[in-house]
Amino acid sequence: MKTKISLFAMALCTFSLLAQNMNNVQMPEITRINSRKFINVPNIMGYKTLKCDFHMHTVFSDGQVWPTIRVDEAWQEGLDVIAITDHIENNPSKKFVSGDDNSSYEIAKPYAEKKGILLIKGAEITRAMTPGHFNALFLTNTNELDTPNYMNAFEAAKKQGAFIIWNHPGWKAQQPDTCKWWDIHTELLNKGMLHAVEVFNEQEYYPIAFDWCNEKGIAYTAASDIHGLVENLYDLSKNHRPMTLVLATENSESALKEALFAGRTIAWFGHFLAGKEDYLREFFKASIKISQISDKKVYRVVNVSDVPFILKSTDGTQFTIAAFSESTIEIPVSNKGDFEVVNLIIRSNKNLSVKFPF
Ligand SMILES: [Zn+2]
Ligand SMILES: [Zn+2]
């Protein structure tokens, strides 16, 4: 019986090979199913939470990929918005890649529209310290920023209505021993030419920059500043690229711009969130659903976000609410319920405080 079945299977197989063009036998089963991840973050305060990366490079500056690859990566990772921010002043591939400062956007834009990714026109003003490197977003003509005097570049960006971010303020190549806010940054701020800072860039963060955001009224951002492939730098099976969450009325360029100028942002890097206290409190509240399952302070906790929450109390009680899952936690009867969420940062030396049960 066995022999009969295998002979029959072989005959079928031969038949199916003969039915095809023998010079071209396709094996779709070995290819990857092209899919988009979901990033789970709650919408809060009546806004939609947009997942954004405002800093990345292509072969049109010192990056290693063609602009459309940035769209594919963002789509696969579940982002909503990206800005390609090629260096205006640094293009080592110029000999091999023609075009100008608008080219990476122009190439990627039609593809981004097709994939449903909002692509913002941006560029990196790349100067020595001071003032350093800055991303200008919502540009209309990047070529106008290509000018010897940096203040002329900032003026051109402002004229185009740009939102301007100070990038990697504590980058060791520019500030080896410190992360200092200089007089020029106050001047740019006063002239309406500085609206945000990267508190996190690629794989490093700058605690002092959290305080600048609060004291100077600028927005928190986090970005990948990716030059090669995203998946070569970050372990995407366990983590996500650094990104800025923007609380916008809708997913559109005008709503995004309004939200950024209003400072409605949260920086997300690793398992940390950094931002204004009220935004982080609302994010935490919207992520957690809690119910008591016994009168001995045992609780069922559901976390609907991809951010874990690590809680610590002054009496030494400590627990983690795992990301996007359900946990059971037991609080000692003596505990008063005052907790600090150690991975939600509201100042360089202060985390979000919450009262249990939340
Ligand atoms: Zn830079
Ligand atoms: Zn950069």
Image: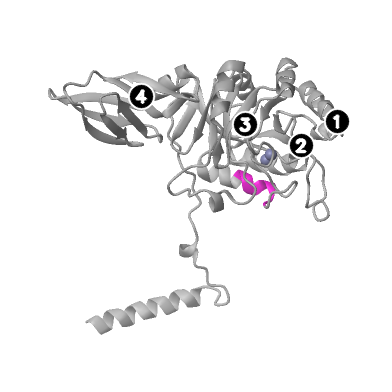
Query: Which residue is disc 3 drawn over?
Result: 179
Mark linked to residue 340: 4
Asked whether 6 falls inside the magenta stretch, the response is no
Are dots 1 and 3 in contact, CB under 8 Å?
Answer: no
Circle 2 or circle 3, nearest the eye: 3
Q: Residues within 10 Å of mark 4 (few under 14, many from 20)?
A: many
Look at 72% across and 39% down and name the residue there: 105
Q: Residue 315, percent across and down?
A: 25, 25
Name the outermost residue toward the right.
Answer: 148
Q: Which residues are magenta?
A: 65-71
CA–CA distance in space, label 4 to label 2: 40 Å
Look at 41% across and 76% down and name the residue there: 13
Pick whichever, 184 or 99, lies toward us. 184
Pick whichever, 14 or 188, lies toward us. 188
Query: Which residue is disc 1 drawn over?
Result: 149
Q: Residue 314, percent across and down?
A: 29, 23
Look at 26% across and 28% down and name the residue there: 316
Query: Disc 2 residue type?
Result: Ala
Any part of residue 45 in sight? no
Query: Disc 1 residue type?
Result: Asn
Q: Earlier in the sequence, mark 2 or mark 3?
A: 2
Q: Residues within 10 Å of mark 3 (few under 14, many from 20)?
A: some
Name the outermost residue toward the front.
Answer: 177
